[in-house]
């Protein structure tokens, strides 16, 4: 297992970024990719790729010294465990698997509009030593880094700058979905999405996109549920589909009796490309709303000004209904 000399290494902690990569890449490129996943990728997907991947989610500890020691061990041993990484191209997300990236360049994949300009830097003691032990990318990411060779995007960057030598590659994701049969089938198979499952959603007129405010420590659960209820108003729950965020692990749907829940963890874009088309979509501030291939569908975007803690975390995002 994992003895093949892969030509690519894919670093992924976002299912949406993985979706873009699989639709952007050819069959040969996908088959020649060794994936490094963290817990941001659904467990079912990680299991699907187990013969050509390494799962960071299985390392001991989620944070703290035990986890840091495991990450450092990866940095010190990866050249011997996976020698192909020395000459492989790196694709994906620079803030995932920095221990394998070392000081090499990467072809970045869009993670989502709200993340493109964010730095992963955090105040840390002994940062110089940690970069020596983890690799130069450790908490050293900025979008304009000269180490980003290219970035694959679904729309041009308007607010954020990249390095002058970084090539911006703009793709039409809907066109890729139609024409990349291999990538499309892998997405369906790895997530376990079937025609029968999609048929069950046909009577859902409304869609609520829930988020990870509680999981990320931004809001207490009670406040998050209260905001969803305000957002939905008098929507008939029997006609509502709740689509949890792929990283959610708290069952928020139990607070909305009668509503259906899409149990498959996947990006909303995947569900849309599969043909699900509600009459109206509700969200607090999920920017996936703006990358969905829908036309003439009503949407309600609550924004962040409903709670100061959301403003502090995400900045001011105005309410919109269209």
Image (cartoon, rainbow, N blue to C red):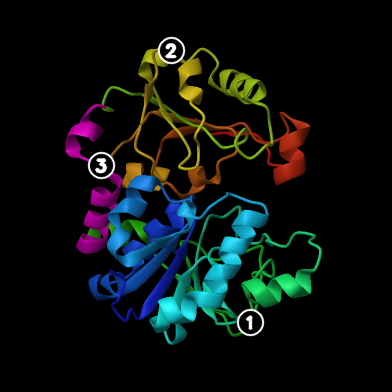
Q: Is residue 97 left or right of residue 122?
A: left
Name which quarter of the figure residue 241 lies in: top left
* First in sequence: mark 1 vs mark 3: 1
Q: Residues within 10 Å of mark 3 (few under 14, many from 20)?
A: some
Residue 187, x across and y down, in percent: 29, 53
Residue 227 drawn above or below residue 315: above
Q: Is residue 192 left or right of residue 45?
A: left
Q: Which mark is residue 175?
A: none
Q: Is residue 322 left or right of residue 126?
A: left
* First in sequence: mark 3 vs mark 2: 3
Q: Residues within 10 Å of mark 1 (few under 14, many from 20)?
A: some
Residue that lies at the very extreme toward the left in this rendered image: 196
Q: Which mark is residue 146?
A: 1
Residue 228 drawn above or below residue 73: above
Q: Residue at 36% across / 24% down in the picture?
A: 205
Q: CA–CA distance between discs 1 and 3?
A: 39 Å
Q: Are discs 2 and 1 less than 8 Å apart at CB? A: no
The residue under label 3 is: 193
The residue under label 2 is: 257
């Amino acid at each position: 297992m994992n003895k093949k000399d892969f030509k690519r290494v894919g670093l992924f902690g976002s299912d949406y970024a993985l979706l873009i990569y699989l639709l952007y890449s050819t069959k040969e490129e996908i088959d020649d990719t060794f994936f490094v996943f963290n817990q941001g990728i659904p467990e079912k997907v990680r299991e699907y790729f187990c013969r050509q991947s390494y799962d960071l989610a299985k390392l001991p500890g989620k944070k703290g010294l035990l986890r840091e020691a495991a990450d450092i061990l990866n940095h010190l041993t990866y050249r011997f465990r996976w020698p192909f990484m020395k000459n492989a191209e790196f694709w994906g997300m620079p803030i995932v698997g920095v221990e394998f990236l070392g000081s090499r360049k990467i072809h970045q994949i869009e993670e989502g509009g709200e993340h493109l300009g964010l730095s992963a830097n955090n105040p840390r003691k002994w940062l110089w030593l940690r970069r020596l032990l983890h690799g130069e990318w450790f908490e050293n990411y900025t979008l304009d880094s000269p180490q980003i060779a290219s970035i694959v995007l679904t729309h041009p960057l308007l607010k954020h700058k990249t390095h002058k030598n970084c090539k911006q590659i703009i793709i039409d994701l809907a066109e890729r979905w139609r024409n990349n049969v291999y990538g499309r089938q892998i997405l369906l198979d790895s997530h376990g999405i079937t025609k029968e499952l999609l048929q069950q959603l046909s009577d859902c007129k409304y869609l609520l996109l829930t988020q990870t405010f509680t999981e990320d420590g931004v809001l207490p659960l009670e406040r998050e549920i209260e905001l969803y209820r305000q957002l939905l108003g008098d929507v008939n729950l029997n006609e509502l589909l709740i689509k949890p965020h792929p990283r959610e692990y708290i069952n928020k749907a139990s607070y909305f009796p009668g509503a259906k829940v899409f149990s498959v963890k996947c990006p909303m874009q995947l569900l849309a490309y599969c043909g699900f088309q509600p009459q109206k979509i509700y969200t607090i501030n999920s920017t996936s709303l703006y990358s969905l291939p829908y036309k003439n569908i009503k949407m309600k975007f609550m924004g962040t000004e409903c709670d100061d803690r959301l403003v502090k975390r995400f900045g001011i995002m105005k309410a919109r209904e269209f």
